[in-house]
Image: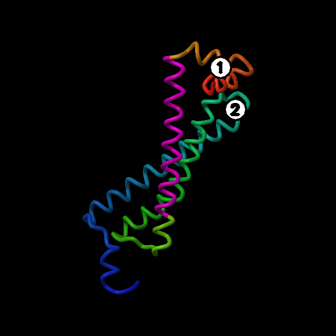
Amino acid sequence: MGNASETFLLVSRISKDLDFLMGTIYIIFGMLSVVGNGILMFVAYRKKSSLKPAEFFVVNLAISDLGMTITLFPLAISSAFTHMWLFNETTCIAYAFCGVLFGLCSLTNLTVLSCVCWLKVCCPNYVNNVLIHPRGISYQVVHLIV
């Protein structure tokens, strides 16, 4: 550690009791996340030949969530129980990078999934025409360009 002012910046601003509660909640949700996303990826691997295209986005979402859990939760849990950030500035930057990376990946997957659901519910004929015809997507892209 450096001087006293640097140490003060690393100390948590919430109470020790709340930090302990947050660490406990992180442990519970972390274990649930690893187990749930692991089961989903195992089932997807076993049934990979029968997955529909939209279901690959769900698998990608599970991978993103698992990556976030594995990279971020251990750092957050250990820091919560000690009531301060335990790691150096480089780790802090990597922590933020992983948070943004996996967060954007999850957001993008959820956006695509909601668009697919909207298309299937609100425009079923459009989706069926695109998916039934072998060159349906190509025709739609050419139609949009022209």
**Amino acid type at mark 1:** Val
The N terminus: image quadrant? bottom left
- Please say whether residue 72 is one of the residues in the magenta stretch: no
| Residue under the point 42% across and 62% down | 77
Query: Mark 2 to mark 1: distance in Å?
Result: 25 Å
Helix, strand or loop at disc 2? Answer: loop
What residue is disc 2 on?
47
- Please say whether residue 101 is one of the residues in the magenta stretch: yes
Q: Which colour scheme is used?
A: rainbow
| Residue under the point 57% across and 36% down | 58
Left or right: residue 16 versus residue 56 is: left
Left or right: residue 140 versus residue 36 is: right
Which residue is more in the foreground, 21 or 88? 88
Total labels: the figure holds 2
Q: What stretch is highlighted in magenta?
A: 95-122
Which residue is more in the foreground, 131 or 61? 131
Q: Where is residue 46 in the image (x, y as percent from the top left)?
A: 70, 36
Q: Position of residue 18 (x, y in %)?
A: 28, 60
Q: Nearer the viewer, mark 2 or mark 1?
A: 1
**Amino acid type at mark 2:** Lys
Q: Where is residue 135 in the image (x, y as percent from the top left)?
A: 73, 22
| Residue under the point 47% across and 58% down | 73
